[in-house]
Amino acid sequence: MGDTKGTFFVKIKANSGFTNADYLAKAAELAKKYGDGTLERTTRQSVENQGVPGTNEDKLMTEIYASGLATIGMGYCTEGLVGQVRQDIDEEKCNGCGRCAELCRVDAISIVLGKSVIDRDKCISCGWCIRGCPHEAVIETEHGYSTWLGDSDTRRPADGIL
Ligand code: SF4
Ligand code: SF4
């Protein structure tokens, strides 16, 4: 792996590993512009830009979204920046099938009176429900990223045990 100490890697999402020439061209452009010019193909089928200095994080994330791409994460050792989304349910489209509730890893979704309802106190804004809804009823309303110190185990802070 090409992780470089003191810099970040950025994962650009590829749906089920599918990419096209425009996707790769843009990823390569971003790698040269904001990172060390290295692109890595990961075992999870995304493409990673390597060697991104902290001063370039915000500009890179902004350009990824502005160009129509998306990120599924960014990190380095004990630090991580992770793409985040907020969402709303389109009740006209939702048929209460429950697929989103099955996908949600923090049990933030319930089906109430045949419609999906999101518990905002539990939701960690991962976006799986948006990607997984077969009826396009989960609508992205906002996107950005958050910083996790301690990698993905810290996405939901918890009391420690001494
Ligand atoms: S997966 Fe979509 S249609 Fe099914 S309950 Fe969730 S929001 Fe509604
Ligand atoms: S964004 Fe993630 S955590 Fe929030 S409701 Fe959807 S699947 Fe659950």
Image: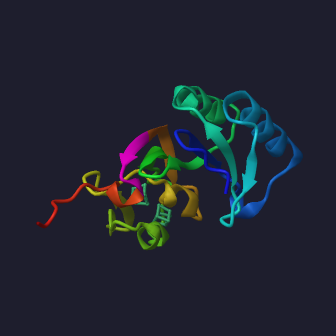
Q: Note whether residue 10 is visible.
A: yes
Residue placed most toward the observer, 126 or 30 = 30
The majority secondary structure of the magenta stretch comes to strand
Residue at figure coordinates x 44%, y 74% from the top left? 102
Residue at figure coordinates x 46%, y 66% from the top left? 100
Residue 81 in the figure: left or right of residue 56: left
Magenta run includes residue 148: yes
Magenta run includes residue 75: no
Residue 26 in the figure: left or right of residue 125: right
Q: Quadrant of the C terminus?
A: bottom left
Residue placed most toward the observer, 83 or 78 = 78
Q: Quadrant of ligand 2?
A: bottom left
Residue placed most toward the observer, 126 or 120 = 126
Residue at the farthest right position: 21
Magenta residues? 146-151
Q: Position of residue 7 (x, y in %)?
A: 55, 39
Q: Note whether residue 97 is visible.
A: no
Residue 17 in the figure: left or right of residue 135: right
- Report how many numbered discs are placed on residues in the image: 0
Residue at the farthest left position: 162
Residue at figure coordinates x 39%, y 63% from the top left? 115
Image quarter of residue 59: top right
Residue 117 in the figure: left or right of residue 79: left
